[in-house]
Image (cartoon, coloured by chain):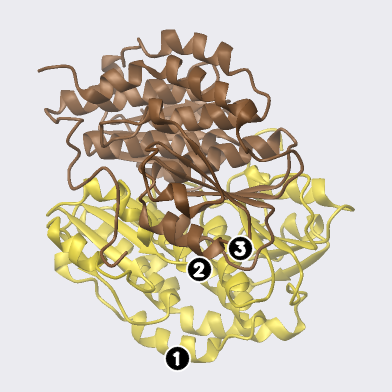
Chain colours: A brown, B yellow
Amino acid sequence: MTTPLVSTEIATQPDTWRQAAALAPSSPLPRRGQRVAVVGCGTSWFIAQAYAARREGLGHGVTDAFAASEFPTGRDYDLVVAISRSGTTSEVLTLLRKLRGNVPTLAIIGDPDSPGREAADEVVTLPFADERSVVQTRFATSTLSLLRAGLGEDVESLAAAAKDAVRWSAPSALLERTQITFLGRGWSVGLAHEAALKCREAALAWTESYPAMDYRHGPKAISDENSAVVFLGSRPDGLVEEVEATGALALWFDEDPQLTLVRCQLFAVAYALSKGLDPDRPRHLTRSIILSGE
Amino acid sequence: MTTPLVSTEIATQPDTWRQAAALAPSSPLPRRGQRVAVVGCGTSWFIAQAYAARREGLGHGVTDAFAASEFPTGRDYDLVVAISRSGTTSEVLTLLRKLRGNVPTLAIIGDPDSPGREAADEVVTLPFADERSVVQTRFATSTLSLLRAGLGEDVESLAAAAKDAVRWSAPSALLERTQITFLGRGWSVGLAHEAALKCREAALAWTESYPAMDYRHGPKAISDENSAVVFLGSRPDGLVEEVEATGALALWFDEDPQLTLVRCQLFAVAYALSKGLDPDRPRHLTRSIILSGE
C-alpha cells in the first residue's frame, strides 16, 4: 500500500504550525479582554473548544465555543471566530451571514478561494495547511497554533517537539484494543473529542471522549480488557489506577496535549490500516459539508 | 428474572415529575434575567446542559452548563445551580465550598440527609425521586421537571403524556443494532448525551451522541446496517434520509424530547436484559462518586 495522503500531511505539522504562528502578529485575532465565541462543525468545533478553554484559562477573557448549528442568539460577544477548512460549511456560512452587521466576525479558513472569505468581516487563510485528505489533521492543529501564538504561547518550541511526535508509532498493545476512550482536562477536553473523532472517521472505531473526571461518572462501565484510555493533558489523582483495575490499558505522555493529539492522529491512521481500511477514504464522508438548498 | 429496580423507578416518573413541579413555586430557583451556571457530573451534567439551553432558549437569561470538575473560575454569575442525586459527589461539594461567599449557590439533591445540604446557600431536595438503582433515571428527569416548572412550562401535561411513554417497548429492530447514536438540537442535546450514557451504563453498549447537525461532520462514518440513530427533538431537513442511506435505522417520536428520553431509558434496560446483563448492577459503578481524600 502506498503511503496514505493523511500520513504525509500529518508529518508536515511542525512546519505548518510555524507558518501559522508566523501569521499571528499581523492577523486580526481576539484581543485581550474581549468576550469571544468560537464556532465550527466537527473537528473545527473541537478545536474551537480547545482554544476557548485555553484562552480563558490564560486570562485573556471569557471565551465560549459552540457547534455552529447550536450558536445561541442573544448573547453579547465582542467577536465571533469561525473555523472552517473548506470555507464552505453551510452552518458556518449561514451563521456568519446572520451575524453580519451585528457582531464583528473573523473566519479562519484553509481554502483562500472560498465563500467563507466574503461571509466574515475579517479573514485569515492558511492555504499551506489545507489538505487533500478528507480526515483533517494539520489544518486543525495549524489553526490552533495560530490561535495559541495569538495568546503569546511558544509555538516554536512546540513545533520543535512535534518533530519527534510525528515519528511516533502506536504500540501494538494499543492497536489491539477495540474500544478507546480519550480523556482531557480544561483545554485538552476539546482535543480529546478531536482524537476520538479521528478514530471514528478513519478507523470506524468505537471511541469515546470526556472531561477526565467525568470518566468515573458512568463512562467507566464500558472499560474492560478490550479497552484503552488515553490521557491528553494531566491525569487526575487515582484515575490511572481506576482505569487499570477495569483491565483497560492506560496511556499518557508528559507533554503539551497538542503533541498527544498528533500521536492520536497517527494512531487513528495505524488503526485504520490494521483493520484493512483506507484512511484517505473515510466511509460516507466528503471533504466539506454543503447542505442542499444552501 | 424479577423486575429490575430501575424499571420500577422508570415507571414512577409521571408521579415524581408532578411532585417535583409542585415544589417550583416555593423553591429558590433561578429568576428571570439572572446569569446562571448549572453544574453536575455524569447524568447531572447532561441534565444541566438540557436545562441551560432550555432556559436561555425561552428567554430567561444567559445560562451555561459545566461538568463540575471543569467549572471556569473568574466568570460572573448571579447564581450557580448544582445537581447531585446523592449530594455527596466530590467535585460538586468541592466547587460549592469554593464558591461560598463569592457566588450564591443552589443545590438540587435527592438525599435530604447528605453533605450537599450544608455546602450550598440554598437547597431543594427531591427525596421522592431518589433511587435505589445505581443507573439514574427518575431523579434526573424529576430535577428537569422542577427546573422546567420554574420556567413556567406545563409539567402536568408532560406527566400525563409520560404515562404512555413509560409503557413503551423498544422495537426488536432497535434491540438488534449494535451501535446507537442519539441526536438532539438545542436543549435536547443534553438529553441525547444522557440517553447515550444510559446505554453505556446499563448495557455496556457502543453509543454516541451529538448535536444533530454535527452528525454529518464525521460521526456519520460509523453508521451502517448495524447502527441505529435516535432523534430527540426535531430532525434537520434531509438527515433521516442520510441516516437511512448508510443502512442505519432512523427512529424518532413527535413529542417533547423529555418523553423520548424516557423511551431511551426503557431501551437501555431492555438492551441490557437482551444481552444478559443486570441493569441494576452496572459494571464498575457505584451509587455516588466520592474521591479518596475528600
Q: Say whether residue B7 is left or right of residue B28.
A: left
- Residue A134 on image: x %, y %: 26, 37
Q: Earlier in the sequence, mark 1 or mark 2?
A: 1
Q: Which dot marks residue A194?
A: none
**Of helix, strand and loop, which one carries label 3?**
loop
The disc labelled 3 sits on which kind of residue? Answer: Gly
Q: Residue furthest right?
A: B101
Between marks 2 and 3 in the image, the one whose residue lies nearer the viewer:
3
The answer to whether residue A220 shows anywhere in this view is no
- Quadrant of the frame with the C terminus of chain A: bottom left
B236 in relation to B207, above or below? below
Q: Nearer the viewer, residue B187 or B282?
A: B187
Q: Say whether residue B71 is left or right of residue B121.
A: left
Q: Disc 2 marks which residue?
A: B187
- Residue A180 on image: x %, y %: 34, 33
Q: Which dot marks residue A101?
A: 3
Q: Are marks 1 and 3 in contact (CB under 8 Å)?
A: no
B222 in relation to B1, above or below? above
Q: Nearer the viewer, residue A176 or B85?
A: A176
Count the marks: 3
**Of helix, strand and loop, which one carries label 2?**
loop
The answer to whether residue A90 shows anywhere in this view is yes
Q: Are marks 1 and 2 in contact (CB under 8 Å)?
A: no
Between marks 1 and 2 in the image, the one whose residue lies nearer the viewer:
2
Q: Are marks 2 and 3 in contact (CB under 8 Å)?
A: no
Residue at 63% across, 75% down: B147
Q: Chain of mark 2?
A: B
The disc labelled 1 sits on which kind of residue? Answer: Ala
Q: Disc 1 marks which residue?
A: B160
